[in-house]
């Protein structure tokens, strides 16, 4: 295995808490219903990236997020709630940081490794999100799939990290809390860590991550051992 030269993090679900907007905006609902709404929104968001990529169509991630939200609002009979759609979309641009994100970023920064976000998200939205989450000064590069016009797990998306750092696949550590994304990064040849916070079953795909960790706090030790 090559020495690690840089680290790329997925954003949504990994560094950012994608369920925070629904928890806040739907606080009057039963917590179980708010969680189910958020789960559907997120699931349709990811599905729409895959489907558009398969169909050879690219729309910015903000549009995909809005389309998925509209589906969830219809499914839960909430489309007519005044201001709800606008509130949720605005919140999605400024998501909370995952509690374990900042310690991991700081540890890797202190070790001298350059850090990137490698995300389906739009560059402008990711920059806004990083500022809101308190990540300024901890992220060296923001790499968005908008540069290649196709969503992860397409190989073109992961290749952005190689081009950004002038590295071979095995020289990039890639960290994602999404099992499908970790599998995609591993298939491409990145040194991949799956942050399996929910202790979900392993994905049944051709490539498996090099390491499975329970929290981002475990990531620096694994990456620095390889570096």
Image (cartoon, grey):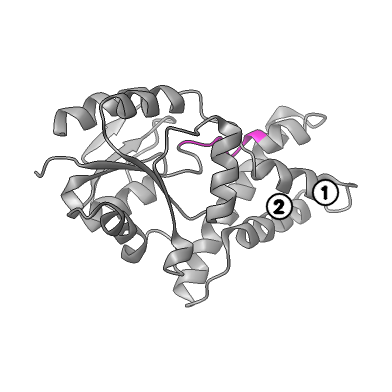
The C terminus: image quadrant = top left
Q: Residue at x 71, y 52 (%)?
A: 72
Secondary structure found at label 1:
loop
- Specify the quadrant of the image occupied by residue 44: bottom right
According to the picture, the residue beneath numbered tag 1 turns out to be: 78
**Mark 1 vs 2, N-terminal side:** 2
Tell me where residue 39 appears, x and y as whole percent. 60, 43
Residue placed under numbered mark 2 in the picture: 72
State the residue in front, 163 or 86: 163
Give, as a single range, the part of the protein colored magenta: 15-20
Residue 2 circle label: none
Residue 168, visible in the rendered structure: yes
- Measured along the vertical axis of the image, is residue 153 above or below residue 224? below
In this picture, residue 147 sits left or right of residue 65: left
Q: CA distance from mark 1 to mark 2?
A: 8 Å
Choose between 82 and 145: the one closer to the eye: 145
Position of residue 128 measured from the top left corner of the image (x, y, whole percent):
60, 44
Main SS of residues in magenta: loop
- The location of residue 218, given as percent across then percent down, is 31, 24
Query: Is 223 displayed left or right of 39 in the figure?
Result: left
Looking at the rendering, which quadrant does residue 10 occupy? top left
- Whether residue 215 is visible to the viewer of this picture, yes or no, is no
Confirm whether the magenta stretch covers residue 89: no
**Do the residues bearing badges 1 and 2 touch, measured as CB atoms within 8 Å?**
yes
Rendered residue at 74%/53% (across/down): 75
For label 2, the crowd category at 10 Å Cα-Cα, with few meaning under 14, some 14 to 19 and many 20 or more, is many
């Amino acid at each position: 295995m090559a020495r690690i030269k840089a680290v790329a993090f997925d954003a949504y679900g990994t560094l950012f808490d994608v369920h925070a907007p629904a928890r806040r905006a739907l606080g009057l609902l039963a917590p179980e219903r708010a969680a189910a709404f958020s789960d559907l929104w997120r699931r349709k968001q990811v599905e729409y990236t895959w489907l558009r990529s398969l169909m050879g169509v690219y729309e910015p991630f903000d549009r995909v997020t809005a389309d998925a939200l509209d589906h969830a609002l219809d499914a839960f009979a909430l489309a007519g709630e005044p201001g709800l759609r606008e509130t949720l979309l605005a919140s999605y641009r400024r998501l909370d940081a995952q509690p374990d994100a900042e310690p991991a970023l700081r540890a890797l920064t202190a070790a001298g490794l350059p850090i990137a976000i490698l995300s389906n998200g739009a560059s402008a939205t990711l920059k806004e999100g990083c500022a809101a989450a308190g990540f300024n000064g901890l992220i060296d590069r923001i790499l968005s799939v908008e540069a290649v016009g196709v969503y992860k797990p397409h190989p073109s998306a992961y290749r952005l990290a190689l081009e950004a750092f002038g590295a071979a696949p095995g020289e990039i550590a890639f960290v994602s809390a999404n099992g499908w994304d970790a599998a995609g990064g591993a298939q491409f040849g990145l040194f991949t860590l799956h942050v399996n916070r929910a202790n979900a079953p392993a994905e049944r795909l051709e490539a498996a991550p090099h390491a499975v960790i329970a929290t981002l706090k475990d990531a620096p030790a694994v990456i620095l051992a390889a570096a």
